[in-house]
Amino acid sequence: IMNCTRTEQMKDAEMDNQTIRAIVERYSDMIMRIAYQNTRDYAEAEDILQDVYFAMLKRTFESEEHRKAWLIRATVNKCKNYWKSARRKNLPLEENRAASAPERGVMEELFSLSAPERTVLYLHYYEKYTAKEIGKMLRKSENAVFIFLSRARKHLKFVIEGERDEDLRVY
């Protein structure tokens, strides 16, 4: 009887490890994107990713959608904590990740948006959430989400059209 119980415990632990691996594979890219666009620091984004997963292990979820929404909310909160932390204030400014020139340009423009605009833009276009769902996750009204989306689109459109105009000028 003891062997059977021990074997069952080992199977349960193995199942948990498989489940955790599946969750990490499914959500790591999303969490890293949110963390990086909010911290602008690749190493810090990795730390936030680990912190979020560690916190997730202490929780239970009603559904996979609930888990995903919680992961997004937890990541955003960890990013806010990062900006408030004394540790961040003492870090030297340096390039944390080598990026190509076009990628740097896009990232610079995204970083010029406010944090809520970046987060809403990401959740809407990459994760395919509706304004209502985003509002619920970020504890904002649906109208506020639409305003963030509108401002972000206008800003990016202005920047892109401005670059095109500069490219077309004859000197």
Image: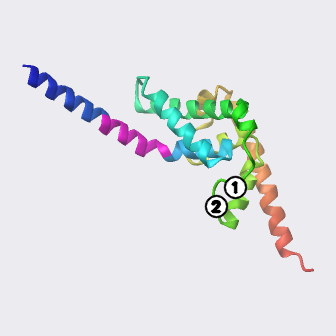
Check the image and name the residue furthest to the left.
1
Which residue occupies the foreground of this view, 129 or 72? 72
Calculate the distance from the C-alpha at mark 2 to the C-alpha at mark 1: 7 Å
Q: In which quarter of the image is the C terminus?
A: bottom right
For the question of whether residue 166 can be seen, the reply is yes
- Identify the main secondary structure in magenta: helix
> Which mark is drawn over residue 98?
2
Q: What element carries label 1?
A: loop
* Residue under numbered circle 1: 95
Q: What amino acid is labelled 1 in the image?
A: Glu
- Which picture quadrant has residue 7? top left
- The answer to whether residue 125 is above or below residue 85 is below
Do the numbered discs 2 and 1 sit on residues whose CB atoms are within 8 Å? yes
Image spot of residue 38 (x, y percent):
67, 41
For the question of whether residue 124 can be seen, the reply is no
Q: Does the magenta stretch include residue 19?
A: yes
| Chain part drawn in magenta | 17-28
Relative horizontal placement of residue 63, taking residue 78 as reference (left or right): left
Which residue is found at the position 71% from the left and 34% from the top?
83
Give neighbour class at mark 2: few <14, some 14-19, many 20+ (Cα, 10 Å).
few
Image spot of residue 15 (x, y percent):
26, 34
Q: In which quarter of the image is the N terminus?
A: top left
Which residue is found at the position 50% from the left and 37% from the top?
50
